[in-house]
Image: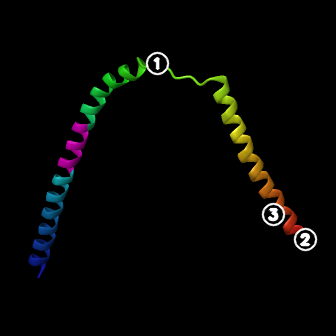
Amino acid sequence: MPKTLMQSIANQLQKERTRLEGELHRVTAALTAFGKVYLEGSKAKAIIASRKKRTISAAGRKKIAAAQRARWAVLKAAKTKKVKVGRT
């Protein structure tokens, strides 16, 4: 009986070793791929840095601000409406 128990433990350990070797292979492949992207990423950063920075006009900023104020007004109106209903 102890011999079969030892054999079973040895078999389980061998299966775990095989599984871990496969996992290690996948991790190594991922690190290799990441390394390539990381090294080539410096080229992409140079391209992005050379792009012209986009700006927004004063009129555009005013339109965005007005739209945001309108959204805030709607939220504030809904909030005060809930408070009044809750007190009554």
Residue 67: percent from left, percent from top: 69, 40
User: Where's residue 6, x and y in %?
Assistant: 13, 72
Residue at the (77%, 58%) spot, across then down = 78
Q: Residue 88's mark?
A: 2
Q: Tell me if mark 2 has few (under 14), some (14-19) or many (20+) residues whose alpha carbon lies within 10 angstroms of its own.
A: few
Q: How crowded is mark 1: few (under 14 residues within 10 Å), some or many (20 or more)?
A: few
Secondary structure of the residue carrying tag 2 is loop
Question: Counting residues from the N terminus, which is met first, the one under dot 1 or under dot 2?
Answer: 1
Q: In this picture, is 17 found above or below 1?
A: above
Q: What is the number of the mark on residue 52?
A: 1
What is the distance, in whole Å, between disc 1 and disc 2 at their CAs? Answer: 57 Å
Query: Which stretch is magenta?
Result: 24-33
> Which quadrant of the view contains residue 34?
top left
Locate the C terminus and report the quarter of the image it occupies.
bottom right
Which is nearer the N-term, disc 1 or disc 3?
Answer: 1
Secondary structure of the residue carrying tag 3 is: helix
Quarter containing the N terminus: bottom left
| Magenta-colored stretch includes residue 32 | yes
The amino acid beneath tag 2 is Thr
Q: In this view, does 32 lie to the left or right of 86?
A: left
* Amino acid found under the numbered disc labelled 1: Lys
- Label 1 close to label 2 by CB (< 8 Å): no
